[in-house]
C-alpha cells in the first residue's frame, strides 16, 4: 500500500511464511452463503485443525468425515484488505466476534454470478461511498471547508476539517487522479477521476489538488 | 482568561439544542402518525439510508427515516410510512454495527437478527448512544437522553453542518470577529497602544509640514522673480527648519517604536501563554486528535505572525489612514476636481481586492498546511530515527522529506507568484491618476495660474497620497496571513474544556479507598471498552490487573487518573466522586509509572524531582535508592547532575524505568499506579524493587498492570479483565484453584519459562 521500495529480497522469507501460516481461502467449492432477514450467513467446510475455534457453530452432524467439518454461521461480515486498490478481491470473512473464517481471493472468479453480485452489494453497503459527479460549491471558512455536491443518489452537503488531510489523492496509471474524501463524521465520498470532472467542478477544487 | 473570552455559554446552548431536537422530531412523528399524540415516547432517533442498496454500482436515494421507541415497542418509519415495528418484550439484544462507510442498528428478536435501521456515519454516535440507552432502558426502565446535545445536526441560521461533538455553529455564534478577540488580549496594553497611536498622529502632522516648507523654498528663494531681495538668513532658516522637522519626526518615531515593541511583545507572550495553557488544559483525548507538529506551529509560528501584525501592520495601517485622510482633506480644499481625478481609480482597485482575496487566502492556507506537513514528517522521522537506521531507510526518508519540501516550495512559489503578478497591476492602476495630474498641473503652470513651488508642494502631497493607497493594496495579503494564523489560534482558544473542575472542587487529602461503581467507558459511543466494572479497594491493598492485550487495563487506569471521564457509573476515592476533586489535587496524590517512560531534557536530579521541586537532596537520594536507581546513577561520571533527555546521556530502557519509578515515589502518592512499570527490568532487579516498594506502600493503594504474572506475586488481589468486564477477582491462590482465565494465563507462562534447561 505505502510506497515502499520494492527491490528487496523477500522471496526466501515469503516461502517460509506461507509454510507456517495457513490461510483458508473460501470459494464456491468449500462454502455457500445464506441469507435471513437480509443478513448474510455462511456454511463452510473447514479444516479439522481449525474446528476447535468454532465449537458451538459446527454442525452436530457427525457424518462430516475425514479432515473436514462443516461450520454454520447465521451472521457474517465482509471486509476489504485493499479497499482502494482491490475492492472486490482479498475479502476477509469474519463473524460478529471479529474472528476471521477465511479469505476470498476474488469474488468474480471464486463465486457464481448471483452470489458474487450479492456479496458485492454487501460490501457496497458496508463501505457506503457515494460517487461525486459534480461539485456545486466549496466554501472554506475558518479552516473548515463546506462542500455541496451532486452525488449518484442526489445532492448532499458535507464538511471537512482539513482538506489536505481529509482528501486522499491516488494517482492512476493513465494520469487519472482519484480522490477519496472522508468528511468530519467519517463518511466516505469518491471522485473516480478529478481530471474528468466538468470544468466548473474542477475549478472549485483545483486549489486543493 | 479563557472564560472571559468565551462569547457564548456553550452549556446553555447545548441544552437548548437538545430540547429543540426533541421538539422537532416529535413534531415530525405527529405529522406521520397523529395517533401517537397520546402515547408516551421514550426516544426518537433519525436515520438516512435505505435498508438495502440497489446494487453494487449505484446507490439508492437517501431516505427520511424516523425510529420511535414507545414503552412497549419500537416503530420504524421511512419517508412518512411505517415499515416495521418490534415489541420490546421480544427483543433480547440491541447491537450497533459500525462499518467503514455506514452504520446499522440491529436487534435480536426471537433468536433472529432483525434490522432496525441503516444510516450514514454522522448518525454513528447517536445510534451508538441510543442502543446503549435502550439496553439500559430494557433493564431498568430509565432512558437518559444526554447524548442528544452532541447529536449531529445542521445550523438553523446558515444550514451548514455542525462539526462532531459540537452544537455550535462556528459561523453564527462568533460574529464578534477576530479583531475584537484580539483586542481582548491586547487590552492590558491599551495605554501603550494609545501612546503609539497618538505619536503616529503627531508624526503624520509633522511630516505634512515639509511640503509647505518646500514650496516656500522654491517660490520665495530659488525661483523668486526678484532674486536681489532674497535674504540669505531666511534661506538658511527655511533649510534649518526642514532639518528640524525631520529630526523631530524621527525622534517621535523612536518613541513610537519603543511603545509598540513593548506592547507587541507583551501581546505575543500572553497569546502564547493563553494557547499553551489551553492546550495543556485539553483532555488527552482532544490532544490526541491533533499532531504535535500542528500544535507547535500554533504556539510558535502563529503567535509570531500575530505579533508582526500588531507591531508592523496595525500601526502602519493607522498611520497610512491618517495620512490619507489629512491629504485628501487638503487636496479637496485646494481643488476638489483635481482631488476627485486623483482618487478616481481607488474604488475600482478596492473592488478588485475583494475579488483576488479569496483565491489568495486559499493559496496561503495551502502553504500553511504543506508547511505543517513538512514539520510533522520531520518530527516523525526524528522520533523514529532508530527504526529508520535499523532498516536502512535513510534514503527513503530523505526522499519523503524532499517531496514535501518540494511541495512546500511549489506552494510558496504559487502563492507568491500569484501575489507578485496581481500586486504590480494593482499598483499601476492606483497610480493612474498621476498622469491626469501631470496634464492638469502642466497646463496651469503654462497658464500662469500656478507657481513652480505650488506645483512641487502639490505633487509631493499627491505622491504622499499614493504611498498609503499602495500600502493599502498590500493589505489583503497581510490580512490573509494574519487571518489564517488568528483563526488557527482562536480555534484552540475557543475549544471547550471537556474535563473541567467543578466550581468548588475538593482538594482534600485522600486515604486511598477506591470504588468503581458500575463503571462503563468507551473511546467512542459505539464500542464499550469497559462495561459495568465494580470494585472496592481498601487503602493499602495492592491490586494486580491482568488480562489480554487490548482488554482495557490501561483504560481502567486512565479513568482512575481522570484523563478521561467515565461514561456510566462513577469512580470514588474515599467515597468522593472523582469529578468532584480538583484535578490538580487528585493527580498530585496519585503517582504513576507508565509503560512508556518519558524523561525531560535536564539532569537526572531534575527528572526525579519533577513532580516535587521542593524535595530535599536526601529525599531524592532515598527515592532513587528505593527505585534501585541509585547504584547506576552513581556509576555515571556526573552522577545526579548527569544531563539526560534528548541530547544528553542515553540511558537504557531499564534505567529510564527506574528513574521514573523514583519520580513517582518522591511524589509520595497515596495511590500508586504501575503500568508495566518494571517490564524492562530483569527479574532479580524487579524483585528487589518490589520488596522495597511493598514496604513503602503499606497503607497506600497500588494498582499494577503486568503481563509478567510473577510481577504481581505480592498483590493482595488480582482482577482479571476479559471483554471489558471483571471476569475474576481474588488472591493468587484462590484464582489458581478456580482454574479459570487466570489459571490458564499462569499455565501458559509457566510453559514459556520451561524453556530453561531442566535439571537432570
Image: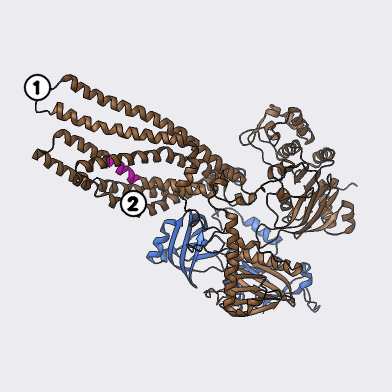
Chain colours: A blue, B brown
Q: In this view, does B214 lie to the left or right of B273?
A: left
Q: Can you say whether B163 is above or below B660 in the image?
A: below
* Residue pictured at 37% horizontal, 65% vertical: A199
Residue B401 is left or right of residue A45, and the answer is left
Residue under mark 2: which chain is it in? B
What kind of secondary structure does the magenta stretch mostly adopt?
Answer: helix
Task: Report helix, strand or loop for mark 1.
Answer: helix
Q: Residue at x 85, y 50 (%)?
A: B717
Secondary structure at badge 2 equals helix
Residue at position x 68%, y 28% in the image: B641
Residue B81 is situated, as x and y percent measured from the top left of the image, at 58, 80
Q: Is residue A113 magenta?
A: no
Residue neighbourhood size for the residue with mark 2, other residues' Cα within 10 Å, grouped as few (<14), some (14–19), many (≥20): many
Give the residue at mark 2.
Answer: B353
Residue A133 at x, y = what percent? 45, 69
Specify whether residue B619 is in view. yes
Q: What stretch is highlighted in magenta?
A: B465-474
**Which quadrant is the N terminus of chain B positioned in?**
top right
Which residue in the protein does label 1 denote? B228
Amino acid at each position: 500500500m505505502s510506497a515502499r521500495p520494492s527491490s528487496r529480497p523477500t522471496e526466501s522469507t515469503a516461502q517460509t511464511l506461507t509454510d507456517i501460516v495457513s490461510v483458508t481461502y473460501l470459494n464456491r467449492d468449500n462454502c455457500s452463503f445464506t441469507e435471513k432477514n437480509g443478513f448474510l450467513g455462511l456454511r463452510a467446510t473447514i479444516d479439522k485443525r481449525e474446528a476447535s475455534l468454532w465449537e458451538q457453530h459446527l454442525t452436530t452432524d457427525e457424518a462430516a468425515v475425514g479432515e473436514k467439518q462443516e461450520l454454520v454461521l447465521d451472521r457474517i461480515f465482509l471486509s476489504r484488505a485493499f479497499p482502494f486498490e482491490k475492492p472486490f478481491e482479498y475479502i476477509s470473512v469474519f463473524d460478529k466476534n471479529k474472528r476471521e473464517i477465511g479469505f476470498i481471493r476474488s469474488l468474480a472468479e471464486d463465486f457464481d454470478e448471483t452470489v458474487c453480485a450479492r456479496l458485492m452489494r454487501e460490501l457496497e453497503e458496508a463501505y457506503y461511498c457515494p460517487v461525486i459527479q459534480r461539485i456545486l460549491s466549496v466554501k472554506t471558512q475558518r479552516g473548515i471547508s463546506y462542500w455541496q455536491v451532486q452525488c449518484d443518489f442526489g445532492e448532499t452537503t458535507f464538511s471537512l476539517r482539513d482538506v489536505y488531510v481529509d482528501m486522499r489523492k491516488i494517482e492512476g496509471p493513465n494520469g487519472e487522479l482519484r480522490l477519496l474524501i472522508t468528511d468530519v463524521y467519517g463518511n466516505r465520498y469518491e471522485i473516480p477521476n478529478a481530471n474528468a470532472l466538468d470544468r466548473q467542478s474542477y475549478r472549485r477544487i483545483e486549489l486543493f489538488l | 482568561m479563557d472564560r472571559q473570552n468565551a462569547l457564548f455559554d456553550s452549556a446553555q446552548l447545548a441544552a437548548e439544542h437538545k430540547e429543540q431536537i426533541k421538539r422537532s422530531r416529535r413534531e415530525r412523528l405527529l405529522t406521520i402518525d397523529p395517533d401517537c399524540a397520546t402515547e408516551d415516547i421514550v426516544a426518537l432517533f433519525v436515520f438516512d439510508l435505505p435498508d438495502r442498496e440497489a446494487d453494487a454500482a449505484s446507490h439508492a436515494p437517501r431516505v427520511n427515516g424516523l425510529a420511535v421507541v414507545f414503552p412497549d415497542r419500537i416503530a420504524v418509519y421511512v419517508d412518512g410510512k411505517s415499515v416495521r415495528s418490534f415489541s420490546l418484550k421480544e427483543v433480547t439484544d440491541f447491537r450497533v454495527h459500525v462499518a467503514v462507510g455506514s452504520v446499522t442498528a440491529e436487534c435480536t428478536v426471537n433468536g433472529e437478527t432483525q434490522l432496525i435501521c441503516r444510516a450514514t456515519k454522522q448518525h454513528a454516535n447517536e445510534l451508538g448512544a441510543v442502543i446503549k440507552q435502550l439496553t439500559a432502558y430494557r433493564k431498568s426502565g430509565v432512558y437518559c437522553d444526554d447524548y442528544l446535545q452532541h447529536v449531529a445536526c445542521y445550523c438553523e441560521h446558515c444550514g451548514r453542518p455542525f462539526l462532531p461533538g459540537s452544537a455550535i455553529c462556528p459561523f453564527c455564534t462568533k460574529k464578534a470577529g477576530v479583531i475584537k478577540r484580539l483586542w481582548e488580549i491586547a487590552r492590558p496594553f491599551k495605554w501603550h497602544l494609545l501612546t503609539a497611536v497618538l505619536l503616529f498622529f503627531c508624526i503624520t502632522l509633522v511630516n505634512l509640514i515639509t511640503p509647505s516648507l518646500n514650496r516656500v523654498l522654491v517660490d520665495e528663494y530659488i525661483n523668486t522673480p526678484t532674486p536681489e531681495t532674497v535674504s540669505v538668513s531666511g534661506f538658511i532658516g527655511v533649510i534649518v527648519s526642514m532639518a528640524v522637522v525631520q529630526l523631530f519626526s524621527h525622534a517621535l518615531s523612536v518613541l513610537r517604536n519603543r511603545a509598540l515593541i513593548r506592547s507587541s511583545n507583551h501581546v505575543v507572550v500572553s497569546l502564547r501563554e493563553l494557547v499553551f495553557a489551553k492546550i495543556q488544559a485539553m483532555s488527552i483525548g482532544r490532544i490526541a486528535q491533533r499532531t504535535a507538529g500542528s500544535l507547535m506551529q500554533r504556539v510558535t509560528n502563529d503567535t509570531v505572525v500575530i505579533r508582526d501584525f500588531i507591531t508592523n501592520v496595525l500601526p502602519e495601517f493607522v498611520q497610512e489612514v491618517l495620512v490619507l485622510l489629512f491629504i485628501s482633506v487638503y487636496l479637496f480644499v485646494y481643488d476638489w476636481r483635481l482631488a476627485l481625478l486623483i482618487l478616481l481609480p481607488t474604488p475600482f482597485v478596492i473592488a478588485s481586492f475583494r475579488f483576488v482575496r479569496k483565491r489568495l487566502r486559499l493559496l496561503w492556507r495551502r502553504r500553511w498546511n504543506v508547511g505543517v506537513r513538512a514539520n510533522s514528517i520531520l518530527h516523525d522521522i526524528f522520533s523514529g530515527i532508530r527504526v529508520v537506521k535499523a532498516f536502512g531507510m535513510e534514503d527513503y526518508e530523505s526522499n519523503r522529506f524532499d517531496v514535501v519540501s518540494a511541495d512546500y516550495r511549489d506552494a510558496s512559489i504559487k502563492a507568491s507568484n500569484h501575489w507578485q503578478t496581481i500586486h504590480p497591476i494593482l499598483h499601476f492602476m492606483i497610480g493612474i491618476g498621476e498622469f491626469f495630474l501631470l496634464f492638469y498641473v502642466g497646463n496651469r503652470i503654462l497658464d500662469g495660474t500656478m507657481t513652480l513651488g505650488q506645483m512641487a508642494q502639490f505633487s509631493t502631497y499627491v505622491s504622499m497620497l499614493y504611498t498609503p493607497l499602495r500600502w493599502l493594496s498590500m493589505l489583503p495579503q497581510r490580512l490573509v496571513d494574519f487571518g489564517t494564523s488568528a483563526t488557527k489560534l482562536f480555534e484552540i482558544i475557543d475549544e471547550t474544556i471537556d474535563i473541567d473542575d467543578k466550581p468548588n472542587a475538593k482538594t482534600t487529602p485522600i486515604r486511598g479507598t477506591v470504588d468503581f461503581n458500575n463503571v462503563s467507558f468507551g473511546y467512542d459511543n459505539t464500542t464499550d471498552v469497559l462495561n459495568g466494572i465494580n470494585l472496592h479497594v481498601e487503602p493499602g491493598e495492592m491490586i494486580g490487573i491482568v488480562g489480554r492485550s487490548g482488554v482495557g487495563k490501561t483504560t481502567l487506569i486512565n479513568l482512575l487518573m481522570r484523563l478521561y471521564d467515565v461514561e456510566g457509573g462513577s469512580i470514588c476515592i474515599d467515597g468522593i466522586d472523582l469529578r468532584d476533586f480538583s484535578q490538580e489535587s487528585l493527580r498530585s496524590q496519585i503517582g504513576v509509572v507508565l509503560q512508556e517512560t518519558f524523561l525531560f531534557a535536564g539532569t537526572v536530579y531534575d527528572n526525579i524531582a519533577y513532580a516535587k521541586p521542593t524535595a530535599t537532596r536526601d529525599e531524592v537520594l532515598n527515592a532513587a535508592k528505593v527505585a534501585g536507581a541509585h547504584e547506576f546513577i552513581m556509576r555515571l561520571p556526573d552522577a545526579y547532575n548527569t544531563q539526560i533527555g534528548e541530547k544528553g546521556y542515553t540511558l537504557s530502557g531499564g534505567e529510564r524505568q527506574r528513574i521514573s519509578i523514583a519520580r513517582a515515589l518522591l511524589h509520595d502518592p497515596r495511590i500508586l499506579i504501575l503500568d508495566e512499570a518494571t517490564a524492562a527490568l530483569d527479574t532479580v532487579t524487579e524483585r528487589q524493587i518490589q520488596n522495597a516498594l511493598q514496604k513503602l506502600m503499606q497503607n497506600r493503594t497500588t494498582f499494577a498492570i503486568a503481563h509478567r504474572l510473577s510481577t504481581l506475586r505480592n498483590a493482595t488481589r488480582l482482577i482479571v479483565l476479559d471483554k471489558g468486564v471483571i471476569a475474576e477477582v481474588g488472591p493468587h491462590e484462590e484464582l489458581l484453584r478456580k482454574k479459570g482465565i487466570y489459571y490458564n494465563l499462569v499455565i501458559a507462562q509457566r510453559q514459556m519459562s520451561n524453556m530453561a534447561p531442566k535439571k537432570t
